[in-house]
């Protein structure tokens, strides 16, 4: 299957699921039907060509799958009182370009689900991530995540949650989970947890598209604005993050002339407008940090003192291991590598970092800055063994080799 077809199917999947759930309900069976339609497309489109209306094609095939399901003996027994009125008629479906993904996003963040389940279900249904990818994002076994997603779909089914545009009170109740979902989708696209490619642009594009929808609906919300700005400011660097052969290029070595200036300008304008008037939150602070990086014409012109202060504030209002890792790098740039290493020390006992390659990778970098090449090499090698991303593994192996040669 070509990358063009793969990207198209990923972008259309949540739209097709939203169309089916709006028309028929039954979130869980709708997702099964959509997956079968996607499989059919993956097999047929590369040889027969992409249809003129690919979204309509997928909706029609998925609705026929629902027809087959609901006409089975088991389905007839379960739905003997409703099958006559619920049997799908593909001709009644809206197969135009109407996009209900925004509504699906808020349905997945149903208040009957735990925050972790809301995020997991939305990543699966809206973001198109596999169960394996979601499990890695949450640092839990794949089987645990599969059960969590299955229970989430069953809970929505049991509650008979309506699929419609959320009311203002529902938006307020679910917004934090929605933003966290979009943040994770974007992160998976910007640095894929596994595979041969560093980026998954289809995911970053979808996350930005959805963030724009939420921002359009809630333009005065500082955290919505901050998240969109953060995505734009981060995505702007993507063209310079890899070389011609796909190797990872760290921020300090990137050709800043390849950064997307329009995205940077938009992101800076968004966060500059939000910070003076909105209640400060973690997405705004992360966007502010990204803006400081992006506005430096050269790496050695980066205002690390400002970045360190912003991370210090972020660590106060939203402490987590990822913030500590980045704060340690900023501390090293301002106060020296030993100060950064001291910040990393508590993470050794943090269960959330067990098995995660970023901790030894950052420690290796700081040890290298401190001149301890042997220890840096060992940490780089350890990180390389732990990552499941081919570009990151190659980069870390390269850093280990460089530490040996110096």
Image: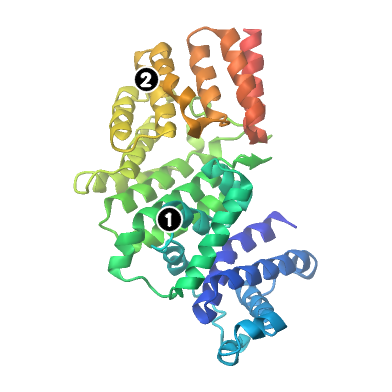
Q: Is residue 318 left or right of residue 142?
A: left
Q: Is residue 222 left or right of residue 246?
A: left
Q: Which mark is residue 7?
A: none
Residue to which mark 2 is pinned:
331
**Screen quadrant of the C terminus:** top right
Residue to which mark 1 is pinned:
114
Q: Are marks 2 and 1 in contact (CB under 8 Å)?
A: no
In the image, residue 47 sits, relative to residue 21, either above or below, namely above
- The residue sitting at 45% across, 25% down in the picture is 347
Determine the secondary structure under disc 1. loop
Number of labels in the image equals 2
Q: Quarter of the image holding residue 396?
A: top right
Residue pushed farthest front?
77
- The residue sitting at 32% across, 41% down in the picture is 282
Q: Residues within 10 Å of mark 2 (few under 14, many from 20)?
A: many
In the image, residue 374 sits, relative to residue 30, either above or below, namely above
Q: Residues within 10 Å of mark 1 (few under 14, many from 20)?
A: some
**Screen quadrant of the N terminus:** bottom right
- The residue sitting at 57% across, 29% down in the picture is 357
Residue 107 percent coordinates (x, y): 44, 67
């Amino acid at each position: 299957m070509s990358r063009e077809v793969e990207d198209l199917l990923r972008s259309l999947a949540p739209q097709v699921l939203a169309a089916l759930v709006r028309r028929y309900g039954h979130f869980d069976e709708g997702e099964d039907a959509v997956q079968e339609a996607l499989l059919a497309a993956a097999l047929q489109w590369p040889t027969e060509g992409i249809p003129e209306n690919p979204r309509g094609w997928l909706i029609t095939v998925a609705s026929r799958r629902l027809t087959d399901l609901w006409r089975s003996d088991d389905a007839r027994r379960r739905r003997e009182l409703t099958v006559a009125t619920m049997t799908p008629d593909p001709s009644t479906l809206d197969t135009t370009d109407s996009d209900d993904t925004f509504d699906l996003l808020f349905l997945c963040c149903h208040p009957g689900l735990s925050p972790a389940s809301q995020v997991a279900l939305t990543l699966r249904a809206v973001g198109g991530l596999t169960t394996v990818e979601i499990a890695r994002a949450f640092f839990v076994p794949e089987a645990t995540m599969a059960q969590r997603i299955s229970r989430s779909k069953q809970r929505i089914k049991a509650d008979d949650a309506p699929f419609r545009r959320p009311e203002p009170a529902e938006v307020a109740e679910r917004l934090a989970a929605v933003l966290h979902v979009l943040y994770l989708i974007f992160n998976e696209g910007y640095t894929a947890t596994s595979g041969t490619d560093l980026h998954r642009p289809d995911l970053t594009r979808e996350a930005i598209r959805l963030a724009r929808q939420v921002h359009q609906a809630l333009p005065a919300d500082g955290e919505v604005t901050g998240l969109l700005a953060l995505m734009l400011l981060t995505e702007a660097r993507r063209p310079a993050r890899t070389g011609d052969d796909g190797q990872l290029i760290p921020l300090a070595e990137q050709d800043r002339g390849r950064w997307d200036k329009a995205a940077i300008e938009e992101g800076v304008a968004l966060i500059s407008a939000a910070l003076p008037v909105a209640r400060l939150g973690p997405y705004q602070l992360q966007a502010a940090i990204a803006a400081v990086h992006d506005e430096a014409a050269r790496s050695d012109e980066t205002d690390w003192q400002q970045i360190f202060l912003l991370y210090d504030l972020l660590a106060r209002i939203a402490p987590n291991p990822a913030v500590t890792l980045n704060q340690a790098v900023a501390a090293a740039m301002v106060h020296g590598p030993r100060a950064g290493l001291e910040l990393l020390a508590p993470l050794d006992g943090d269960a959330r970092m067990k098995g995660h390659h970023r901790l030894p990778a950052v420690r290796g970098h700081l040890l290298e800055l401190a001149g301890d090449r042997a220890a840096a090499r060992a940490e780089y090698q350890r990180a390389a063994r732990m990552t499941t991303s081919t570009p990151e593994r190659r980069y870390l192996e390269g850093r280990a080799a460089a530490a040996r040669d110096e």
